[in-house]
Image (spheres, rainbow, N blue to C red):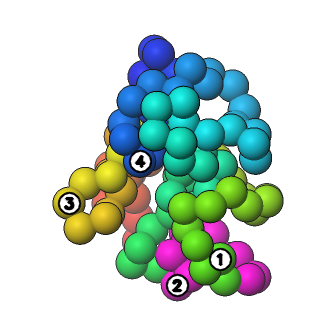
Amino acid sequence: MSNSGLLCWSCGKPTGITGRVMRSDDCIDCGANLRCCRGCRHFDPSRNRQCKENIESFVADKEKNNLCDFFQKRDATKIGGGVSHQRDGKLDKKKNFDDLFKD
């Protein structure tokens, strides 16, 4: 994560949030809800229910606040086609590398 804290998943600007993301937190620049599927590190459009976790219920609006127990903030912004790009940290990059050699 960047030194300036969490970046908004929608506009990419710093939110000023360095700790936990609350359900009431919105981007001060664009107004996007921050504690939502699109702002979570588990969001993956290619997965079942668009989540890397085994969630029980489908969340229809991925850009609205929700109370998911699996929520973990991520440093991500929209790119073309509405897909989010996550900026992986050092530990994530190491895990991804190690996963290449798993049997």
Mark 3 or mark 4: whose residue is earlier in sequence:
4
Report, in whole angstroms, how far the alpha carbon at label 1 lies from the one at label 4: 18 Å
Per the image, the residue denoted by label 1 is 59
Tell me whether the residue at label 1 lies in contact with that at label 2, contact meaning CB atoms closer than 8 angstroms.
no
Which mark lies nearer to you, 1 or 4? 4
Percent across and percent down for residue 38 are 51, 58
Q: What is the magenta segment's predominant secondary structure?
A: loop
Q: Residue furthest top?
A: 3
Could you tell me the amino acid type at mark 2? Asn
Crowd class of label 4 (few under 14; some 14 to 19; many from 20; radius 10 Å): many
Mark 1 or mark 2: whose residue is earlier in sequence:
2
Percent across and percent down for residue 59 are 65, 77
Residue 49 sits inside the magenta stretch: yes
Q: From this viewpoint, is residue 84 visible?
A: yes
Per the image, the residue denoted by label 3 is 80
Tell me whether the residue at label 2 lies in contact with that at label 4, contact meaning CB atoms closer than 8 angstroms.
no
Could you tell me the amino acid type at mark 4? Ser
Q: Residue at x 72, y 32 (%)?
A: 20
Q: Secondary structure at mark 4?
A: loop
Crowd class of label 3 (few under 14; some 14 to 19; many from 20; radius 10 Å): few
Residue 10 is labelled as 4
Report, in whole angstroms, how far the alpha carbon at label 3 lies from the one at label 4: 12 Å
Report, in whole angstroms, how far the alpha carbon at label 2 lies from the one at label 4: 22 Å
Percent across and percent down for residue 62 are 55, 68
Left or right of 84 in this view: 18: right
Residue 48 is labelled as 2
Mark 2 or mark 4: whose residue is earlier in sequence:
4
Mark 2 or mark 3: whose residue is earlier in sequence:
2
Q: Residue at x 47, y 16 (%)?
A: 4
Q: Which residues are magenta?
A: 48-57
